[in-house]
Image (spheres, helix red, strand yellow):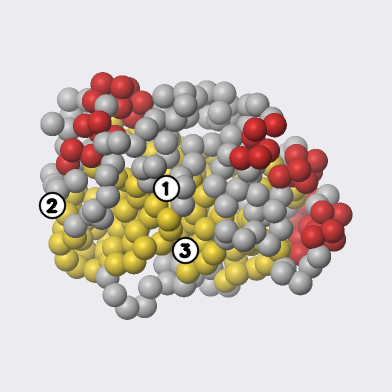
């Protein structure tokens, strides 16, 4: 029977990347990686800028096997009733992101856009803030008082920035960023990001002048076609002040729960595998020891595994229709 296991992160360099991932042991002695893809199983054409966008098992009998290969071999033992993607790949992309500088102001394609544009992939994501410098900001959607016509007229470059809704970054806060919503992760913020398995991003503004970064291509026309100002599905949750468990998100693509405290926990009574992210403290998942920054896959056949928590853990699953 499959037991809970860890996979090696896929480290992605970014011009805005920081050093906190190094402090979490992701790449000792190096700096300025922006993203650690904790769970990834993307085709090369989906993430062409990443040499090998696939997570592989770190140790044990299945060392070196990709998530897709494990799913093909074990089927429901790993996945339960959760299906693979249409091209036979794992249905989640899970990351830690460390922003030393502002990320680009961007938007991701909706299902309506991808239906018209083969080669693009729907991207809905959620952020859980794991660290934040004092005064740091998340840019989430646009000011509700700004008319849509004005937003669409000002999508070209720096003109969009004054319309952005700035939200103070708080450790433990949660923010859902559906496809079509304008957003940017602000400087000094580190998040756990849970998303659909896509890397399609349309940049509106890249702060290259502010940070003396090399200019990158912008995608104003693509963004204009897919943007949803004041997105009705977006929401924010403040940090949990009391209690030990709460539901963070329920979407058609994934669901997320937060567990906190020093205690034994049980996984949610739902079918399918789990991805567990330790965002603070430590945890033991069966024989696997987790520390801050660790991610573990719990196969569907092992959902009764004993879990001892001393910190904060995100539990992630995929809904079954």
Q: Where is residue 275 shown, x and y percent of the image?
A: 32, 45
Q: Name the residue under label 3.
A: 174
- Label 2 packing within 10 angstroms: few (<14), some (14-19), many (20+): some
Relative to 231, is 188 on the left or the right? left
Q: In which quarter of the image is the C terminus?
A: top left
Q: Nearer the viewer, residue 295 or 83?
A: 83
Badge 2 vs badge 1, beta-carbon distance below 8 Å? no
**Alpha-carbon span between mark 3 and mark 2:** 27 Å
Q: Name the residue under label 2.
A: 306
User: First in sequence: mark 3 or mark 1?
Assistant: 3
Residue 25: tell me if it is visible: no
Q: Quadrant of the N terminus?
A: top left
Q: Mark 1 points at which residue?
A: 254
Relative to 253, is 58 on the left or the right? left
Please name the residue shown 65% across and 49% down the image. Answer: 180
Q: Nearer the viewer, residue 195 or 97?
A: 195
**Alpha-carbon span between mark 3 and mark 1:** 15 Å
The image quadrant that residue 198 belongs to is: top right
The vertical placement of 253 against 244, above or below, is: above
């Amino acid at each position: 029977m499959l037991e809970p296991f860890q996979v090696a992160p896929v480290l992605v360099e970014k011009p805005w990347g920081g050093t906190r991932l190094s402090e979490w042991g992701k790449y000792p002695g190096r700096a300025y990686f922006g993203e650690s893809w904790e769970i990834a199983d993307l085709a090369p054409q989906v993430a062409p800028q990443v040499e090998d966008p696939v997570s592989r098992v770190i140790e044990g009998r299945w060392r070196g096997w990709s998530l897709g290969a494990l799913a093909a071999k074990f089927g429901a033992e790993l996945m339960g009733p959760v299906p693979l993607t249409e091209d036979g790949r794992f249905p989640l992309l899970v990351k830690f992101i460390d922003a030393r500088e502002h990320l680009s102001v961007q938007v991701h394609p909706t299902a309506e856009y991808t239906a018209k544009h083969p080669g693009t992939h729907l991207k809905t994501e959620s952020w859980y803030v794991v660290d934040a410098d004092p005064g740091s900001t998340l840019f989430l959607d646009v000011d509700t008082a700004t008319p849509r016509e004005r937003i669409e007229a000002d999508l070209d470059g720096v003109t969009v920035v004054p319309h952005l809704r700035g939200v103070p970054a708080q450790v433990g806060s949660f923010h859902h960023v559906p496809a079509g919503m304008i957003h940017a992760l602000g400087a000094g913020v580190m998040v756990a990001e849970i998303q659909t398995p896509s890397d399609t991003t349309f940049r509106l503004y890249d702060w290259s002048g502010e940070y003396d970064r090399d200019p990158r291509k912008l995608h104003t026309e693509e963004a204009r076609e897919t943007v949803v100002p004041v997105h009705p599905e977006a929401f924010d949750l403040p940090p949990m002040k009391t209690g030990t468990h709460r539901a963070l998100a329920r979407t058609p693509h994934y669901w997320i729960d937060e567990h906190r405290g020093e205690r034994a926990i049980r996984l949610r009574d739902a079918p399918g595998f789990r991805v567990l992210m330790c965002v603070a403290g430590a945890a033991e998942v069966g024989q696997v020891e987790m520390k801050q920054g660790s991610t573990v896959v719990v196969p569907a056949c092992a959902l009764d595994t004993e879990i001892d928590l001393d910190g904060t853990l995100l539990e992630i699953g995929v809904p079954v229709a």
